[in-house]
Amino acid sequence: MFAKFFKPKKRKSVVAEAGAARQDQFEYWLIDMDGALARFLDGLPGELRAKLDFTPESFEALEGWALSRYASLAEARAPSEAATLDGASRYVGQVFRKSLGGRWFIDHRDPKNAFYGLPQLEGLKGQVAQICPLTLVTASLDRRTGTFISTVYRNHLART
């Protein structure tokens, strides 16, 4: 009978709290965009830094540097390289945004999504597929062409 009159306070579920924490982390990541890019660029050789002018033409300079720095994708994924990989990904994403509009977002709804929990871009002019700058950078290190990111960009641009 007591249970009939007593209703416990509703609490957020653990899943909802975890989702809110992940979204907060993403918001902090966005807030730190300018600072993270500055730290990334400051850590690069001066000659390369001069070529990274946030234009699509700079993709090949960035990719060439990354290929010379990392002999394999596994090297780039080392914990000691996390900030560098993040900086390169942010740079690629911001060049796409500057040229094609759009905004950053993160998807925590579908764990089966290949880009689950990774910053992505949406609302780009002519966008028909998901774009995740981190996977563009890692795929460029795996494919080792030196033109992977710029080719993806040009193919996207051709659809606009």
Image (cartoon, rainbow, N blue to C red):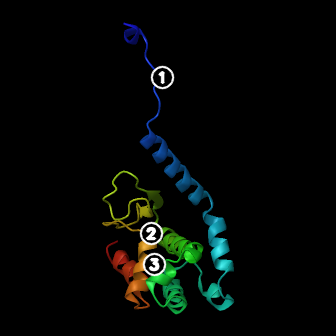
Amino acid at circle 1? Lys
> Which numbered dot is residue 100?
2
Task: Give the CA distance from mark 3 to mark 1.
Answer: 47 Å
Amino acid at circle 3? Val
Q: Quadrant of residue 7?
A: top left
Q: Quadrant of residue 102?
A: bottom left
The residue to which callout 3 is attached is 137
Q: Which secondary structure lies at badge 3?
A: helix
Q: Nearer the viewer, residue 79 or 102?
A: 79
Measuring from the top left, give residue 65's x and y in whole percent. Answer: 54, 89
Amino acid at circle 2? Leu
- Which quadrant does the C terminus fall into? bottom left
Measuring from the top left, give residue 117's x and y in whole percent. Answer: 43, 59
Q: Which secondary structure lies at badge 2?
A: helix
Task: Give the CA distance from mark 2 to mark 3.
Answer: 18 Å
The residue to which callout 1 is attached is 9
Q: Is residue 84 visible?
A: no
